[in-house]
């Protein structure tokens, strides 16, 4: 193959004329024209364009691209890994440099060269570790910036190589070969500066544990072996500010690498040490355990299935084991915690329902309907962790960039079969707790909506028919009936007398019920009272009532949280009015129905109302499912 020909070739014409864009690499154009004209010597990869195209291999965010380098470091046996997002204000355009240091086993010069090649790997198709495709380091680096500098040392002899997309694009060689690694005396000062100066973020320098005190110390601190990946002047990061990048990476990596962190890995991001975050709240040394005043620090392991066998491919008889663990968070202890603790410290309402962990490294977390059920208040308190090995990459749909999973149906079916009963039990338990909580949270006394609806009765055109006892005897009977009625509506924390007082003084009574088969609301009129039942099992509750109530406490984005929702009725300011208005919408409906239940047609109308309630609920449920 002729790899030396570099002279420019004349542009071919007609059907041989390539229609490349303006920004296409010039060297690539030359090679292509030459190839078209000569009709032979076509390389399998046109390096100039291919490397450029690889910049667009989709990493969903900067963190997941940086994770490829952390993966490699962990696989190289590193016990210390440092990630830097260095933003030097003096630098043009505030450009950010990304650097990943590790004290792993490093690479000998020829390994370094192999590592730099696309497809080059020391673990190709090895399913036991994290790497297996031979592309992660290169594609992840290029997805962030056009230049990748690699430094690696064994016995302190530092070798370096650079991959520069623009330089490659300008090459006129048919086949581009990697250069020999260069031996260095010292790390370039741009790099040692990053290693010994505090970063501009985190602002509080006391949070930063710098690698070395000065440039001389850097050389001392480099252990016998190690590697640095450096991507200067990144032009494609998810965020423009180092602070946002650091915070995102901190949150994600604390969870993604929780197992390694739990067993002693020292991972730093901008010199701040990362503590493991366990979304299942099971690890005894994870971050949440140190939240002040947290009485219950662990979730409950409801069940575990250490050995669910899953076919490697659909229909294949060869299988590999998956381990599944099902947890329920301590809802009793945690549902009353302050919002800030629930949200920022514990992250209870993040979408963390199902975590997929491949060879000890989390590859995906989120809701998987088939396993956890939809994301909704009754599932917010359950967690599922699925641990599998690389042999099952096909079954779980692990792609080359190891971001996310796309589990095949047969894999999900096998897991669901095992866990569904227990998952249903957790959801039911949560639902029961929430309904109970809703009842309690409305506190003794009337809700805001009930109180205001009572006040408004003076202004309503049609009065609600009230029992009118004319004799003492009738009055006694009415009181007895009311007491009896009140006991039926008594809240847990109320005495009989308190319940009677509440019912006696209010025309409107709101109760919550949890029943899959009930309409979303129900109205009953009795003894001059209007009882409105709201069904917490209907999506009306989880998708409208609760989120609206949640607005009050700033939780509109987390409609799954019930903890404060009904308390909201006590508040009248700001968005608190919204939920009161919604309750009034229902109370006025209740009132209208009650008004219409007089006279000869009362019974027939009751039937119509019941049917309307059922039909409306069915239609609403169907529609809300689309949300
Ligand atoms: N930090 C490191 N320390 C030691 N060796 C490394 C390091 N980073 C990369 N390597 C070497 O470079 C090779 C290529 O890395 P790369 O991430 O591109 O592919 P991979 O890890 O083998 O597979 P994958 O594409 O699945 O990540 C690795 O196989 C490994 O031998
Ligand atoms: Mg890799």
Image (cartoon, grey):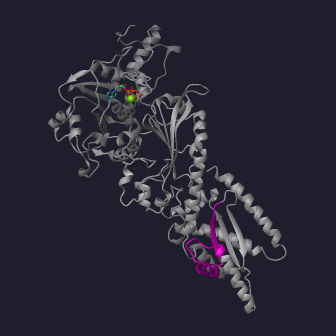
Name above or below for residue 219 compared with residue 89: above
Q: Position of residue 294 (x, y in %)?
A: 39, 59
Q: Considering depth in this image, is 28 or 57 the residue closer to the camera?
A: 57
> Where 479 falls versus 203 (above or below)?
below
Can the viewer see residue 385 in this picture? Answer: yes
Numbered range of the magenta stretch: 487-514
Residue 304 shown left or right of residue 201 in the figure: right
| 162 or 158: nearer the viewer | 158
Residue 23: in sight, yes or no? no
| Nearer-the-camera pick, 12 or 27 | 27
**Residue 78, quarter of the rendered image:** top left
Q: Which of the 4 image quarters holds residue 228?
A: top left
Q: Residue furthest right?
A: 600
Residue 471 percent coordinates (x, y): 75, 92
Residue plotted at (37% across, 29% down)? 137
Question: Residue farthest to the left?
Answer: 216
What is the number of callouts on the image? 0
Decide: is 66 above or below 315.
below
Q: Position of residue 270 (x, y in %)?
A: 29, 43
187 vs 357, left or right, is left
* Quadrant assignment for ligand 2: top left
Q: Quadrant of the N terminus?
A: top left
Place of residue 529 in the rendered image (x, y in percent of width and height, measured from the top left): 69, 77
Q: Is residue 500 magenta?
A: yes
Within the magenta stretch, is there residue 552? no
Q: Residue at 45% of width from left, 15% of height from top?
A: 44
Q: Which residue is painted at 20% across and 27% down in the image?
A: 156
Quadrant position of residue 194: top left
């Amino acid at each position: 193959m002729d790899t030396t020909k570099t002279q420019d070739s004349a542009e071919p014409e007609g059907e041989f004329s390539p229609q490349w864009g303006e920004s296409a690499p010039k060297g690539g154009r030359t090679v292509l024209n030459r190839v078209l004209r000569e009709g032979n010597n076509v390389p399998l990869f046109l390096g100039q364009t291919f490397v450029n195209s690889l910049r667009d291999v989709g990493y969903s965010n900067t963190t997941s691209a940086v994770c490829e380098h952390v993966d490699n470091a962990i696989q190289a046996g590193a016990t210390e890994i440092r990630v830097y997002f260095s933003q030097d204000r003096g630098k043009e355009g505030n450009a950010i440099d990304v650097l990943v240091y590790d004290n792993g086993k490093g690479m000998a010069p020829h390994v370094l060269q192999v590592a730099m090649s696309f497809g080059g790997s020391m673990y190709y198709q090895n399913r036991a570790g994290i790497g297996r495709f031979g592309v992660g380091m290169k594609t992840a680096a290029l997805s962030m910036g056009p230049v990748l500098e690699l430094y690696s040392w064994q016995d302190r002899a530092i070798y370096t190589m650079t991959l520069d997309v623009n330089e490659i694009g300008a090459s006129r060689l048919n086949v581009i070969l990697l250069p020999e690694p260069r031996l260095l005396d010292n790390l370039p000062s741009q790099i040692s500066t990053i290693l010994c100066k505090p970063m501009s973020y985190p602002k509080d320098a006391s949070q930063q544990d710098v690698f070395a005190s000065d440039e001389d110390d850097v050389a001392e601190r480099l252990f016998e072996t190690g590697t640095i990946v450096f991507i200067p002047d990144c032009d494609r990061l998810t965020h423009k500010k180092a602070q946002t990048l650091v915070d995102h990476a901190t949150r994600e990596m604390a969870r993604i690498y929780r197992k390694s962190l739990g067993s002693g890995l020292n991972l730093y991001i901008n010199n701040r040490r990362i503590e493991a975050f366990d979304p299942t709240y099971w690890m005894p040394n994870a971050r949440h355990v140190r939240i002040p005043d947290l009485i219950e620090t662990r979730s409950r392991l409801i069940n575990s299935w250490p050995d669910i066998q899953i076919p490697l491919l659909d229909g294949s008889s060869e299988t590999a084991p998956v381990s599944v663990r099902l947890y329920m968070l301590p809802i009793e202890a945690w549902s009353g915690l302050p919002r800030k603790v629930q949200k920022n410290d514990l992250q209870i309402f993040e979408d963390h329902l199902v975590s997929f962990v491949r060879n000890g490294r989390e590859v995906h977390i989120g809701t998987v309907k088939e396993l956890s059920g939809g994301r909704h208040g009754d599932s917010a308190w359950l967690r599922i962790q699925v641990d599998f090995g690389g042999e099952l990459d096909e079954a779980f749909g692990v792609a080359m960039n190891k971001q996310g999973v796309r589990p095949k149906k047969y894999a999900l079916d096998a897991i669901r079969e095992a866990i569904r009963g227990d998952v249903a039990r957790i959801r039911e338990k949560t639902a029961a707790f929430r309904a109970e909580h809703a009842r309690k949270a409305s506190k003794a006394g009337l809700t805001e909506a009930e109180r205001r609806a009572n006040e408004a009765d003076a202004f309503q055109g049609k009065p609600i028919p009230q029992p009118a006892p004319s004799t003492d005897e009738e009055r006694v009977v009415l009181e007895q009936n009311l007491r009896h009625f009140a006991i039926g509506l008594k809240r847990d924390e109320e005495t009989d007398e308190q319940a009677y007082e509440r019912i006696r003084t209010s025309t409107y009574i709101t109760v919550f019920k949890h029943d899959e088969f009930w309409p979303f609301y129900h109205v009953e009129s009795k003894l001059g009272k209007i009882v409105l039942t709201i069904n917490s099992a209907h999506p009306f509750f989880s998708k409208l009532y609760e989120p609206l109530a949640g607005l009050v406490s700033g939780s509109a984005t987390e409609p799954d949280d019930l903890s404060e929702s009904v308390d909201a009725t006590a508040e009248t300011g700001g968005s608190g009015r919204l939920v009161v208005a919604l309750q009034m919408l229902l109370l006025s409906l209740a009132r209208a129905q009650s008004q219409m239940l007089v006279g000869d047609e009362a019974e027939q109308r009751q039937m119509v109302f019941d049917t309307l309630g059922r039909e409306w609920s069915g239609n609403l449920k169907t529609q809300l499912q689309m949300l």
